[in-house]
Image (cartoon, rainbow, N blue to C red):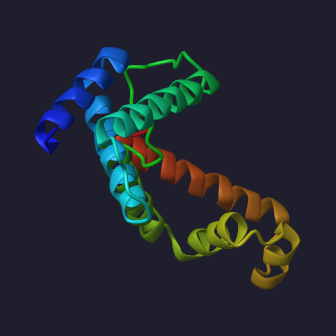
Amino acid sequence: MNEKMLYALLHRFALHRLRCPCDSDDLVQETFTRLYAYRSRRTVEDVTAFCLKVAANLIRDRFRQMSRRPTTTELTDTIVCRQPLVDEVLLYRQRVAILSAAIEAMPPLRREVFLRRRLDGDAVATIAGDLDLSSVAIEKHVTRALGDLRRALDRHGLW
């Protein structure tokens, strides 16, 4: 039997059992790979019988593997991706630009107090001592800075 006829026989054999043309093609390819590997070491008297036996073993192995895997998979309409959506990235960039501009527009003392308290995490007492202000004044500067940021976002409809 020539290779084309053997290929057709194996493909029908695999397709009848697997019911999937792609899987059948893969199985026939694997069968030929094993045939050629085996032939490099030993002689094969009946190539057809050898290939049918190898294909049957591969099919059996495939069904064993499938029985070990979970049979059901929950499908959803959304594809899970760890990257943020493009719209979200643009929205975040807009917010950052607006907030940066609002921070730059603040009076220098309010900006310094806000950045040291909220971004650097300095204690109120430390900031008050460094700037010669009361702790109440520090809290008021932070509150007013937050109000400035809220208003800046609100003006652009992003609050």
The C terminus, quarter of image: top left
4 and 61: which one is in front?
4
121 and 88: which one is in front?
88
| Residue 50 % position (x, y) | 39, 39
| Residue 117 % position (x, y) | 72, 67
| Residue 100 % position (x, y) | 43, 65
Q: Determine the residue positioned at 46% across, 35% down.
A: 58
99 and 3: which one is in front?
3
Residue 69 placement, left or right of 39:
right
Can you see residue 99? yes
Q: Determine the residue positioned at 39% across, 26% down.
A: 78
**Image quarter for residue 120?**
bottom right
Q: Determine the residue positioned at 66% across, 52% down.
A: 143
Residue 147 placement, left or right of 102:
right
Q: Determine the residue positioned at 56% across, 17% down.
A: 71
Residue 11 placement, left or right of 95:
left
Residue 3 placement, left or right of 62:
left
**Image quarter for residue 40?**
bottom left
The N terminus, quarter of image: top left
**Image quarter for residue 134?**
bottom right
The tally of labels here is 0
Figure check: 19 above or below 92:
above
155 and 73: which one is in front?
73
Can you see residue 157? no
Q: Residue furthest right?
A: 125
| Residue 20 % position (x, y) | 29, 22
Q: Residue furthest bottom?
A: 130
